[in-house]
Amino acid sequence: MPVTEKKKVILSGIQPTGVFTLGNYLGAVKNWAGLQDEFQCAYMIADLHAITVRQEPAELRKRTLDAFALLLAAGIDPQKSLTFIQSHVDLHAKLSWVLSCFTQFGEMSRMTQFKDKSQKHPDNVNVGLFTYPVLMAADILLYQADFVPVGADQKQHLEVTRDIAARFNGIYGDVFTIPEPYIPKAGARVMSLQDPTKKMSKSDTNPNGYITILDTKEQIINKCKRAVTDSDREVVYREGKDGINNLLNIYSSITGKTIPECEREFEGKGYGEFKTAVGETVADELRPIRENFARLRADTAYLKECYTAGAQMAYRAGRRTVEKVYKKVGFLLP
Ligand code: TYM
């Protein structure tokens, strides 16, 4: 679908580094489907970003297809939204190079994700990991996105994107739209079930720490039952009760109830009952996605049709931005 003049533009992406977690879902993907009518949306599988950490090639190919099918299973409609795979649109890498020449070394050094990931993979602190946010800025600015729906962990990357865009515009005129982060109130930071001071992540070595979008009801309930909490008995949101706070956030994000409403619902009930209720609510929410996924993933011809068309449309939507940027910086056009 061509980018129309009237609708505001949304862009977001997710890395194909494993089955999406409940964190990915509540922080980002869940909200994406609901934005498709009001906005012109672009959703992509960020495979270029994924190789900042070493990947097994066959596994990356499989996960990319899994991730694409998961987007559709979660309600992204390729007829309404640009739905594509980042490496299929070479404009991202082209724009990223130019933007890297307008990004300061010091700015990148301050990124907390870089610090975290380089600590996790000390044997592979590659330059791609360092300039990761520049590629992300290119993803966003290429489509002149107005809003970027992400979880709270991506906020810093959004801020640097805005800085890069403003700097470029300051030199060359209004080339880029300055994007705004679009972060949900509940679900923006889902924490690990085993260590609720850390964010839930698909790269966690302990699978009890995260729920994936494809876990069965039984697995989900078991993981919730095993969730680390505290020795207190009250289901209330309070400082120091990280485990319970996390489960309350999850429950609130899915049911749409406020935290005080959730607290009232579980007044006088034990942690066991609360954890089971959270598990059941999560399982019910994810069941249709799991079922859609099984059907869609089996139809690789359809998936290919969608991502091929998606890449072509994304190319058409982004081409003008790169042409403009090339002209502005003084490249002799071929
Ligand atoms: P990624 O693949 O790490 O995560 C995808 C989305 O899920 C959100 N998220 C969470 N939200 C709440 N709680 C959590 N525990 C949690 N874990 C992850 C993330 O905030 C994200 O919105 N760099 C991005 C991918 C990307 C991108 C982009 C995003 C590449 N280009 C352009 C927006 C715009 C990333 O690694 O997301």
Image (cartoon, helix red, strand yellow):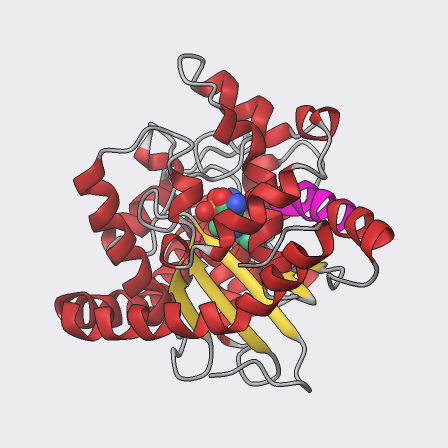
Q: Quadrant of residue 296?
A: bottom left
Q: How many marks?
A: 0
Image position of 282 (left or right of 155): left
Where is residue 261 drawn, in percent x and y? Answer: 66, 64
Q: Main secondary structure of the magenta part?
A: helix
**Residue 286 magenta:** no
Write the start and end of the magenta stretch as one range: 154-163
Q: Is 324 rendered above or below residue 219?
A: below
Q: Identify the residue shown where x is 39% and y is 65%.
A: 84
Image position of 121 (left or right of 18): right
Q: Identify the residue shown where x is 46% and y is 33%.
A: 228
Residue 249 in sight from this viewpoint: no
Q: Quadrant of residue 145?
A: bottom right
Q: State the residue in front, 184 or 179.
A: 179
Q: State the residue in front, 313 or 265.
A: 313
Where is residue 197 drawn, in percent x and y? Answer: 57, 30
Where is residue 271 drawn, in percent x and y? Answer: 48, 44
Q: Identify the residue shown where x is 67% and y is 65%.
A: 147
